[in-house]
Every structure is written in C-alpha cells, then in structure tokens.
C-alpha cells in the first residue's frame, strides 16, 4: 500500500510539471537530436537542467542517463529528482541532477547484448529478431552522446544510468563490460530471462577475470511470481554474486517491491534507488540547529564518499539560516550557518548579505559593515550594499 501511495504522489507531481495554465506553460526541459555515425541513424534525447544551473555559473552536476527516455519517462524521472531536491520544501535528499533522457528507436536491438529469440521456456520470439546491438549502443553513448553532453554542460566526472526491463539488462552489461562509463547504476527489474539467464552466466565469467569492476548499484525487483518465479530467483542470484565478490569498490543493494508489478515498479524504485545512490547526502536541519559545525562535517564526509568535492547547496543553507534567525530565534546559530555559507561561497553577494542580517540582529554593526564592504569588493556597483553601509555608520 505504501509503495502504491508513493507512486500516486509522484504521478501527481509529474502531471503538475506538465500542466498548462491560462497564461503560461511550465516546461522542464528541451529536446535535441544528433546523427550517430555508429548507429547510422538520428537519435533524440531530452535534457533537464536543474534550477541553479543558470544562477550558479560555476557549479558542476552529476548526470543521470535515462533509458527508454520518451516523454513520459522524462517527466517521471525529472519529477522525482525535483521533488527530492527542493529548497522551498526543505528537501535536499539528493544533489541536483542534469538528466539526459534517451528516446528509443529499436529498444530490443539497442539494449540486448546477444542475438536471442528466447523468453523463458519459449523459443523463436519474432519480436526479438533485431536483438544483439547493445555494444553498438554503448559505443554511441561513450563516443558520441556523452562527450556531447560533457562539452555542452557543466558536468562532474560522475554518471548515473537508470534502466528498466531491457534497459536494466543494458545497464548491467555496461557494468560488466564497460565499468568506466558509469559510477552509479539504478537497475529496475532487469530482464533476467534474456538468453537463458545471460546475466548470470556473464556475471560469473566477469567476476573471475575482471580487475576493475566498481560502482554503486541499486537493484529493484518487482513481484512477477504469478508469471514465473525465475525472475526473482535470477535477480537474487545476481545480487549475491555482486555482494560476495572480491571488489571492495562495488557497493550493492537489492529491494523487493512485493506490492509492485513489472510495469508499476519504476516510480518507487527510482525514488528509493536515488536515495541509496546518494545515501548520506541529506542534511538534517534540526541537527544543524543543534550543531552548525555539522555542515562542514557533512560536506567532508559526502565528498569523500562520492569521490568529488561537494558543498552544501548555497540556497538551502541560506534558507535554513533564516529559519534559525527568525523562526527558531537562535541568532548565534544563524550566524554560524551563514558564516559557513560565506566560506563555501566567498564570491556570493547573497551569502554575505545574509550574514550581515544576522550580525545586525545581534547588534554586531561593525561585523555587518565588514560584510557590506566585502560585497562592494565583489560588486562595486551594488547600491543596496552602499546604502546599508551608510545606515550602519
């Protein structure tokens, strides 16, 4: 029941994101296309840029590559990501993401690593005639699409892939065959059945020979028991193989969604998968109000965990600073929070102005003046800073 309610909530979010009012249209991304010399066809993809992308011109972002990325999937994943990182709602469960949602032309061809016409005990499945093109599609992503994204946007060297069903099969094949492409894998009820449990056979083979397998892997299993319990069995076997492997840089978690079927599991799996991938990113504001030094500790720990420097979001810290200043009436805590923001973002006019506000509440006029002077050193023409500097003489 809980997962069903969660799915309804996110569906509502997605609908709102695509809603049209009488005077405006809410847009969440833009569609692009590129001709692939590898695939010999034009491929279309949609891009979502997070809210801070324009306002923070130096910030870099994790990139989530979404397979089966048509309009509905793009809205779905973007809606979930936006909900999990929302300053107005004081939710900072995951970092802001650039989302690249890749549309299909022939998903059977692109996502399958072998040519096979088998489905469980059935053979000669005509729908699988084009199968076996996963390696070419992986080359398209590595050689054409991903360089295009990295050169066009401010990206970190940390990529996430989200794949459902055959898309999950493709993502697993990337993990086993090209582990340098992605750092994080969200595998949603992958097609374990493919080619007589190809995944199980390939995983055992790779674990014996590979030396560089790494990544953070979330596996979601749906309840497909009425069809065939081998879906669950093979998924569990894959999880156990990774969990018990010798690779210390391979983290893996499996969750069985008993209340969800193959076609309903993507929404809750995406939410819980992102929580696992970015576990530790969330900052408990009530704990920060008790000890503002937790911001620095949190940034250090999550940076070490993710392998890239991460600073708590400037807008989020600014918001909780004002909550401490006005709503909680703890100005000393607010000052400590705002001071941390100026250390993280020393060129931010807003960070210094907020710190000045907190100093003035405490009656520390000279310290407030130093903030206004700092603003003028960053932005000499700032009228508000000049006025406030005069007022605090």
Image (tube, helix red, strand yellow):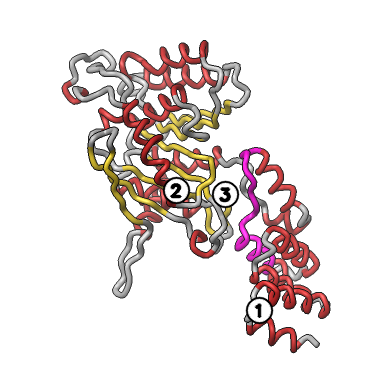
Q: Secondary structure at mark 2?
A: helix
> On the image, numbered disc 2 is attached to which residue?
151
Upstream in the sequence, badge 2 or badge 1? Answer: 2
Quadrant occupied by the N terminus: top left
* Residue at screen point 44% across, 48% down: 151
Relative vertical location of residue 92 with respect to residue 248 in this rendering, above or below: below
The residue range painted magenta reads: 305-323
Q: Position of residue 150 (x, y in %)?
A: 46, 46
Q: Nearer the viewer, residue 390 or 95?
A: 390
Q: CA distance from mark 3 to mark 1?
A: 37 Å
Q: How many residues crowd around disc 3 within 10 Å: few (fewer than 14), some, or many (20 or more)?
A: many
Q: How many residues crowd around disc 2 within 10 Å: few (fewer than 14), some, or many (20 or more)?
A: few
Q: How many marks?
A: 3
* Residue at screen point 63% across, 38% down: 307
> On the image, numbered disc 3 is attached to which residue?
93
Q: Position of residue 236 (x, y in %)?
A: 47, 20
Q: Nearer the viewer, residue 327 or 392?
A: 392
Upstream in the sequence, badge 3 or badge 1? Answer: 3
In this rendering, would 245 be left or right of 49?
right
> On the image, numbered disc 1 is attached to which residue?
380
Relative vertical location of residue 31 with respect to residue 118 in this rendering, above or below: below
In this rendering, would 324 be left or right of 227?
right
Q: Nearer the viewer, mark 2 or mark 3?
A: 2
Instruction: Decide whether the magenta segment is chiefly helix, strand or loop.
Output: helix
Q: Is residue 1 visible?
A: no
């Amino acid at each position: 029941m809980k997962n069903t309610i969660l799915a309804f909530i996110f569906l509502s979010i997605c609908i709102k994101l695509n809603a049209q009012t009488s005077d405006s249209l809410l847009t969440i991304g833009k569609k692009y296309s590129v001709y692939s010399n590898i695939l010999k066809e034009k491929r279309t993809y949609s891009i979502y840029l997070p809210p801070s992308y324009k306002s923070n011109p130096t910030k870099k972002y994790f990139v989530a590559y979404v397979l089966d990325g048509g309009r509905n999937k793009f809205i779905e994943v973007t809606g979930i990501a936006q909900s999990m990182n929302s300053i107005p709602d004081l939710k900072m469960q995951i970092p802001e993401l650039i989302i690249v949602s890749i549309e299909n032309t022939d998903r059977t061809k692109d996502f399958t690593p072998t040519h096979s016409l088998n489905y469980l005990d059935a053979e000669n499945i005509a729908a699988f005639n084009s199968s076996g093109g996963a390696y070419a599609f992986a080359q398209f992503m590595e050689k054409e699409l991903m360089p295009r994204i990295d050169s066009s946007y401010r990206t970190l060297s940390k990529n996430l892939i989200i794949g459902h069903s055959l898309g999950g099969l493709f993502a697993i094949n990337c993990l086993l065959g090209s582990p340098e492409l992605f750092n994080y894998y969200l595998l949603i009820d992958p097609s374990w059945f493919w080619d007589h449990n190809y995944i199980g056979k390939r995983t055992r083979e790779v674990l014996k020979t590979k030396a560089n397998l790494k990544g953070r892997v979330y596996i979601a299993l749906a309840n497909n028991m009425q069809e065939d319990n081998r879906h669950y069995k093979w998924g569990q076997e894959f999880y156990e193989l990774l969990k018990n492997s010798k690779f210390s840089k391979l983290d893996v978690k499996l969750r069985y969604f008993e209340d969800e079927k193959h076609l309903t599991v993507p929404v809750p799996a995406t939410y819980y998968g992102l929580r696992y991938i970015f576990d530790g990113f969330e900052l408990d504001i009530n704990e920060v109000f008790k000890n503002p030094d937790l911001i620095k500790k949190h940034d250090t720990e999550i940076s070490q965990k993710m392998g890239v420097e991460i600073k708590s979001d400037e807008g989020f810290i600014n918001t909780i600073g004002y909550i401490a200043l006005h709503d909680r009436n703890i100005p000393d805590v607010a000052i400590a929070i705002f001071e941390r923001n100026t250390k993280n973002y020393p060129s931010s006019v807003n960070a210094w102005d907020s710190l000045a506000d907190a100093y003035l509440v405490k009656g520390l006029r000279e310290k407030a003046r130093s903030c206004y002077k700092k603003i003028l050193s960053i932005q000499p023409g700032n009228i508000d800073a000049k006025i406030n500097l005069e007022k605090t003489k």
